[in-house]
Image (cartoon, helix red, strand yellow):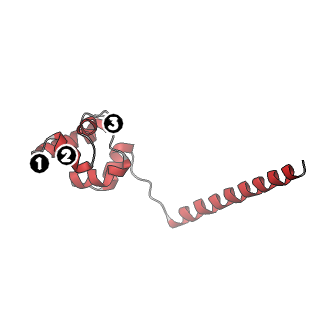
């Protein structure tokens, strides 16, 4: 079973358990019936803005929906890893500012 059909099958089973039509369930998610049908049929994934609603509907964690869609567990992030990522971004921004300042200085001499 592919990832799209796995989540689609879960959605179909839950919808039928609740004795709902596709258009009723689609309305719950704020999408059209054809879009919801594509979710159930495994043609497309729910987009990430719907993960919490899908998780709530299925009675599972948002991380479980994410895992089904992405095929892996969400990456655990430590505080130290976030600090290093921020430091790297700050270095990149400083490099970009320096390069931009150099280009402006070179252009003003011409």
Q: Pinpoint residue 78: horizontal percent, then vertical percent.
A: 49, 63
Tell me residue 105's x, y (percent): 84, 54
Few, some or many C-alpha atoms within 10 Å of disc 3 (few <14, some 14-19, many ≥20)?
A: some
Secondary element at image label 3 = loop
Looking at the image, residue 87 lies above or below residue 17: below
User: Mark 2 — residue?
Assistant: 25
Residue at x 77%, y 53% (from the top left corner): 99
31 sits to left or right of 96: left
Mark 1–mark 3 distance (CA, rounded to whole Å): 22 Å
One can see residue 71 in this view: no
Labelled pair 2, 3 in contact (Cβ < 8 Å): no
Q: Is residue 88 visible in the rendered structure shown here?
A: yes
- The reply to whether the C-beta atoms of the residues labelled 1 and 2 are less than 8 Å apart is yes
Q: Measured along the vertical axis of the image, is residue 8 above or below residue 97?
A: above
Could you say whether the residue bearing mark 2 is in a helix, strand or loop? helix
Q: Position of residue 96 (x, y in %)?
A: 71, 54
Q: Quadrant of residue 89?
A: bottom right
Q: Which residue is mark 3?
A: 44
Q: In the image, which disc is placed on residue 18? A: 1
Q: CA distance from mark 2 to mark 3?
A: 16 Å
Q: Please state if 27 lies on the left or on the right of 65 as rendered.
A: left
Calculate the distance from the C-alpha at mark 1 to the C-alpha at mark 2: 10 Å
| Quadrant housing the N terminus | top left
Mark 1 and mark 2 lie on one chain; the one further toward the N terminus is: 1
Secondary structure beneath dot 1 equals loop
């Amino acid at each position: 079973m592919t990832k799209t059909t796995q989540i689609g099958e879960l959605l179909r089973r839950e919808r039928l358990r609740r004795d709902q039509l596709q258009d009723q369930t689609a309305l719950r998610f704020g999408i059209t019936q054809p879009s919801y049908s594509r979710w159930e049929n495994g043609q497309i994934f729910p987009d990430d803005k719907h993960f919490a609603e899908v998780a709530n509907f299925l009675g599972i964690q948002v991380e479980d929906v994410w895992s089904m869609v992405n095929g892996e567990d969400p990456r655990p992030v430590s505080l130290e890893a976030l600090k290093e990522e921020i430091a790297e971004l700050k270095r990149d921004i400083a490099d970009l500012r320096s390069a931009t300042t150099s280009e402006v200085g070179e252009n003003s001499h011409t």
